[in-house]
Image (spheres, grey):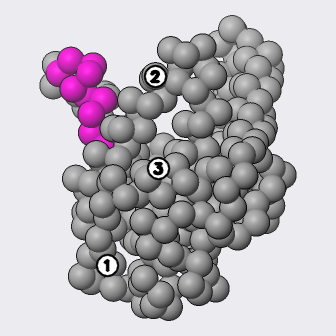
Amino acid sequence: MNEPESSRLQQSLQHGFSLAPKAVLQEGWQRIYGAKLTMVMAAIGVAGSWLLLNHLLLTVAGDSETGDWRASLLGLLISMIMAPMSGGLDMMGIHRAVERPIRANQIFDYFRYVLPLAVASLIMGFMTSLFLPLGAAFGLPAVLAMLPTLVLSVALMFVFPLILEKGLSPFQAILVSLRLFARQWLNLIAIHLILVALFMAAVLSFGIGLVWVAPLYMVVKGIIYREACGVRGAGDATAPASSPSRDHFEA
């Protein structure tokens, strides 16, 4: 677990990597203690920014046909602005997975990467949007047509961190993410299905459960990235999945 991060990614691409869903989720649960408030505040900041920008989109574009081109431009602008903030959430989870300090305003640290992140976001959006019209063309039910989109969304989970933490280009990050997913696709899908079930349960609890589930999702993604790619300068912080986090106080 302590090999250099540069060899970790190469080894994962060539020989695969191990991933135990139960151990990943258990470690993620341990690591959210002492970090829930910070991560929830960051998630609220991202969600609030998204709502604000979408309200701006609807206000400026209006309902007229002449607003279509403005809606497209604003949609592009929103994706460019939100990509660094979404990447910031991913990096918070990674930092927590290797016991680095995190802060709520960390979501604003990555706007200098806005161009590669925006390009990656647009490419991924195009890729994931292909299956619904294809499914409709073949007469498939909407639920079945959405399955490839959901699987591809999981397959692209490494893209933003690979750009921010490894310095890959958008095209390199997408290809590497797909290759990593192919190595552990079953376990990755299983982990995300469990997280989706937890999110549904959290919503049914009038949103109270999101205080635990949202940070858990972020940290679990960070642990998966750590195991698959390694983290620069992490050293011995990449502890085995059975090891608890060092801080035990509640947020």
As shown in the figure, which amino acid type bears the numbered disc 1? Leu
What residue would you read off at disc 1? 13
Could you tell me which secondary element the residue under label 3 belongs to? helix
Could you tell me which secondary element the residue under label 1 belongs to? helix
Q: Nearer the viewer, mark 2 or mark 1?
A: 2
What residue would you read off at disc 3? 124
Q: Nearer the viewer, residue 136 or 248?
A: 248
| Residue 198 place in picture, x, y as percent | 44, 31
Q: Which residue is at the far top?
A: 63
Say which label, 3 or 1, has the lower sequence index: 1
Q: What residue sits 69% from the left and 8% below the top? A: 63
Q: Residues within 10 Å of mark 2 (few under 14, many from 20)?
A: some
User: Where does the magenta region start and end?
Assistant: 140-151
Q: Quadrant of residue 144?
A: top left
As shown in the figure, which amino acid type bears the numbered disc 3? Met
| Residue 247 place in picture, x, y as percent | 69, 61
Q: Residues within 10 Å of mark 3 (few under 14, many from 20)?
A: some
Q: CA distance from mark 3 to mark 1?
A: 21 Å
| Residue 164 place in picture, x, y as percent | 64, 69
Q: Nearer the viewer, residue 84 or 101?
A: 101
Q: What residue sits 17% from the left and 21% below the top? A: 140
As shown in the figure, which amino acid type bears the numbered disc 2? Ala
Is 120 drawn above or below residue 56 in the view shown?
below
Quarter containing the C terminus: top right
The reply to whether dot 2 and dot 1 touch (C-beta < 8 Å) is no
Say which label, 2 or 1, has the lower sequence index: 1
Is 169 drawn above or below residue 122 in the view shown?
below
Q: CA distance from mark 2 to mark 1?
A: 35 Å
Say which label, 2 or 3, has the lower sequence index: 3
